[in-house]
Image: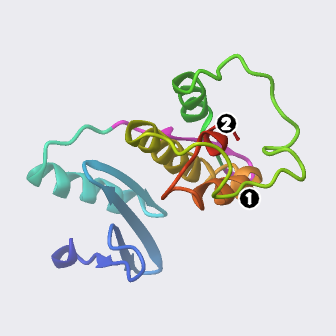
Amino acid sequence: MQRHGYNQGNGDHTLFVKKKEGRVTLLLVYVDDMIVTRDDEEEIIKLKVLLAAEFDLKDLGKLRYFLGIEIATSRTGLVLNQRKYTLDLLEETGKLGCRPASTPLDAGHKLSLREGELLCEEAKGRYQRLVGKLIYLTLTRPDITFVVNVLSQFMHAPTDAHLKA
């Protein structure tokens, strides 16, 4: 990409930026998925031709879904949500029919390392995967960040009490 005028991002090496005559084109790559955005339609067409010459591409059109995040446009900008990701997570954990709580963790509930029985290796792996998925969910759900932070503190030695929380 660099030989075509794109500079790799300093903080994110999957981001490529091309600035030309006051216009900006952004290319974000994750494994075999790409997002292209611009304020220069002509450059987008050139980029698609360039990429199609080197890769087997499938243009999905306007961005609607990327890495578990639904994207919608509004008059004021973009709206991001993880509704499907959340529903899949609830189904996976058997909580799909549960009632919503006003707070993610009961007020005053303190978790400790000594509370409950240590999980077996298989259950420990499930706990760690669940917390990892919850961490990803905090991208669009900052309201659960505190409780996810608390749960992540027990990743090395989770107990049944941590899993229940």
Q: Which percent across, then down, holds residue 58? A: 25, 37
Q: Quadrant of the C terminus?
A: top right
Residue position marked by numbered label 2 in the rendering: 164
Pointer 1 residue: 146
40, above or below 55, in the image? below
Label 2: few (<14), some or many (≥20) within 10 Å? Answer: few
What amino acid type is highlighted by mark number 2?
A: Lys
Q: Earlier in the sequence, mark 2 or mark 1?
A: 1
Q: Amino acid at mark 1?
A: Phe
* 148 sits to left or right of 49: right
Quarter of the image with the N terminus in it:
bottom left
Q: Is residue 139 visible?
A: yes
x, y (%) of residue 98?
A: 74, 21
Q: How is the image coloured?
A: rainbow
User: Residue at coordinates 37% horizontally, 61% vertically from top-left?
Assistant: 28
**Going 54% across and 34% down the picture, which residue do you hit?**
85
Q: Which residues are magenta?
A: 60-78
Q: Which mark is residue 111?
A: none
Residue 66 shows up from this direction:
no
How far from the left and from the top, in percent, is residue 104? 78, 44
Query: Along the line of sight, which residue is nearer the eye, 135 or 52?
Result: 135
The secondary structure type at the circle numbered 1 is: helix
Residue 10 picture location, percent across and down: 38, 83
Q: Residue at x 31, y 77 (%)?
A: 8
Q: List the single residue furthest toward the top.
A: 97
State the residue in front, 1 or 84. 84
Lateral position of residue 156 relative to residue 122, left or right:
right
Quarter of the image holding residue 9? bottom left
Crowd around label 1: few <14 · some 14–19 · many ≥20 (10 Å): few
**Residue at image coords 20%, 74%:** 4
Q: Does residue 145 belong to the magenta stretch?
A: no
